[in-house]
Amino acid sequence: MNIGLEAGFADPVPDAQRCFRAVLDAMAHPGRIAHAAGVTAPYPLGTAAAAVVLTLVDHETPLWLDSDAATARQWIEFHCGAPVVADPAACGFALALALPDLRRLPAGSHESPETSATVICQVASFDTGTAYRLSGPGLREPAVLTVQDLPRDFVSIWRRNHALFPRGIDLILCAGDRLTALPRTVAIEEV
Amino acid sequence: MFAVCVRRWNGGRRRSDADCYDNSTIFIPHCPRGTFMKGYNFAYLDEQTKRMIRRALLKAVAIPGHQVPFGSREMPLPYGWGTGGIQVTASVLGRDDTLKVIDQGADDTTNAVSIRQFFARTAGVRTTTHTGEATVIQTRHRIPEETLRENQIIVYQVPQPEPLYRLEPSRVETKRMHALADYGLMHVKLYEDVARLGQISISYDYPVMVNNRYLMSPSPIPAFDNPKMNRMPALQLFGAGREKRIYAIPPWTEVRSLDFDDHPFRPINAHQACGLCGATDSYKDEVITDDLGGRMFVCSDTDHCEQRRAATVQRHGPARPGHRAVSGPSDETGDDGSGAPRHGEAATP
């Protein structure tokens, strides 16, 4: 019987390790573009978004999917075994094709800020779109990140998130086979 | 210090071949040197554990200096011997990495040798003693003298991640103090030091403020090393296995040693040049050389010391006994000196 499910990582152990190092590198250097590979992504996900999900999500992490990402729900449930939750406030990870309302996601507590959600958001491109200036830990000097597809008022959305520190959402942006990360510590302004 | 325990599985047979190694503190089945051990997952830990640690590491990087709880596993060596560091290293390590492990600055001490061989066998990674060649450096109680560069990762073994532990034993309380950034207690402790002793009397594990928010234990590195943490180009990861905490400092992050305007932070070091390489700017260990009161100060960072001596030899030829080296203030520049406490270990495959 062919259930039409794409495979996961071709070589799970080294593929997951490489993808993790790409995410770690991006989280440690906000805005730095890293590459992910090793997986045939299920529609509508790109290689990077699919690889990040396989690398970080499992049965211990409640996952919330937006309506577009839910198309890949069967694939995610099969490969990760993650409990998919309907309430974004109950998630550990959120996978979305459009930036969700960050205020509906858990931002952690002051005593345990690490319990906040990580949003994996797929965007169109890092080559064209709006340019943002990033500054904060991980950056020797302000860096510029170009992203297509983030909401028009992303800078003010992020300012609210950044102001919650040490609480706050961490964002992993994926476009095709490329990814970058915006931890809560990074300050963002439009160029 | 520690009793050396040799526990090597050899199928019940005595072995005498050359690929045996000594001073193993880690219980791992024997396999010939240079080969990759079968029967375990890459780098020992299972993938589910790695995912859990990786998630904790990402949150730790996103909240610099904050201690993230994690499900520390039993490792094939006791808590307190570097289990936290090993678990962090196992979770970040890949086939392309080159690993260096130091213990108090030295590559050739029991724990460093064991942990390096553990990963050489369970992950088949390249290992090195040269700071510059390593992509991942696991350390106990020192930061290498050579400035770390961007894209290197340094993993610290941490016995006690809570900087307020000696002042407030309750985890519930210290968690709340971190939440409120209420670090008055630590300032009072430093003030009492000054009032009683005229100076801050902490020589290692000197508390730091990370990114102007979290009070953090730098692990028991000498206060001498604290300034190296500030705006370090490398990523700093900390693992406390027994205490089940992971924390991190992203590159280029401000790390400030606590002090007072009128009693500024002062790193402490022996006022002696290294007895082997003559370095005056490195951290020194005092070493007893005989039972007649003989002693010498030598670089704690063995790789740094060896490279300096190798450079001296290249410039001036090997030092002869009784001959004063041109560049060093000490009589002993060669590593042939009697009582030279350290010798380098060649890079393992």
Image (tube, grey):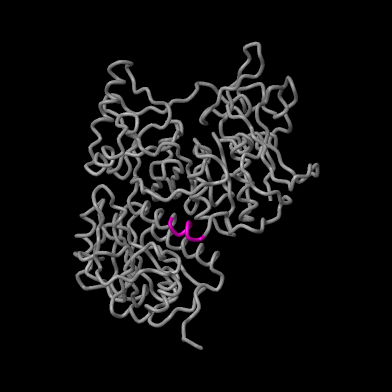
Is there any visible trace of residue A140 in the rendered image?
no
Relative to B250, A191 lies left or right: left
The image position of residue B288, as x and y in percent, is 61, 19
> In the picture, residue B160 is in which quadrant?
top left
> In the picture, residue B318 is in which quadrant?
top right
Please report the residue visible at 79 percent of the width from the left and 42 percent of the height from the top: B14
Please identify the quadrant where the N terminus of chain B is shown: top right
Is there any visible trace of residue A8 in the rendered image?
yes
Q: Does the magenta stretch include residue B321?
A: no
> In the picture, residue B179 is in which quadrant?
top left
**Magenta: main secondary structure:** helix
Relative to B171, B74 lies left or right: right
The image position of residue B83, as x and y in percent, is 51, 44
The image position of residue B44, as x and y in percent, is 57, 54
Q: What stretch is highlighted in magenta?
A: B47-52
A113 over B272 or under it: above or below: below
Q: Nearer the viewer, residue B135 or B70?
A: B70
The image position of residue A169, as x and y in percent, is 28, 60
Please report the residue visible at 67 percent of the width from the left and 56 percent of the height from the top: B36
Residue found at the far bottom of this picture = A1
Q: Which of B279 and B19 is in front in this view?
A: B19
A9 over A31 or under it: above or below: below
